[in-house]
Amino acid sequence: MYKCLDCGNTEKFIGKAREKGCAEIYKIKGGYEWSYKVSENSWESSFTIQKCYYCNSENIIKI
Ligand SMILES: [Zn+2]
């Protein structure tokens, strides 16, 4: 799991996905960034977290 240090969000983040893995992908405003919703066990291996979905903070820690 990951956590945003600024707003406390632990549920939704913006990141990059690798080619494999199971995910639901959402295109969000602007069209340049994507949001991914994945199952717990594929999260760490398939995704690189970049920032918080809600406040755009990059202060994300792994918990
Ligand atoms: Zn946040």
Image: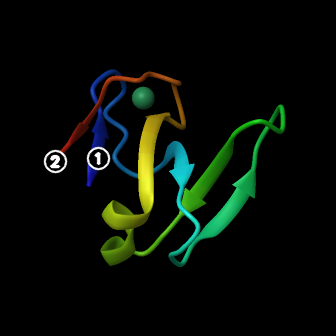
Distance between the alpha carbons at the discs numbered 2 and 1: 5 Å
Q: Secondary structure under badge 2?
A: loop
* Quarter of the rendered image showing ligand 1: top left
Q: Is mark 1 within 8 Å of ligand 1?
A: no
Query: Circles 2 and 1: CB distance less than 8 Å?
Result: yes
Looking at marks 2 and 1 on the same chain, the residue that comes earlier in the sequence is marked by: 1
Please, what is the three-letter code of the amino acid marked with disc 1?
Answer: Tyr
Kind of element beneath mark 1 = strand
Judged from this view, the residue extending furthest toward the front is: 19
x then y, percent, for residue 51: 46, 32
Residue drawn at (47%, 34%) of the image: 52
Tell me the residue that label 2 is attached to.
63
Q: Which residue is mark 1?
A: 2
Percent across and percent down for residue 27 are 77, 50
Amino acid tagged 2: Ile
Closer to us: 59 or 17: 17
Residue 40, image quadrant: bottom left
In this view, 30 is above or below 22: above
Position of residue 40 in the picture relative to residue 38 (left or right): left
Q: Is residue 38 above or below residue 16?
A: below
Q: Residues within 10 Å of mark 2 (few under 14, many from 20)?
A: few
At 70% across and 39% down in the image, what residue appears?
A: 33
Q: Quadrant of residue 22?
A: bottom right
Q: Tell me what residue is drawn at x 33 percent, y 21 percent.
A: 6
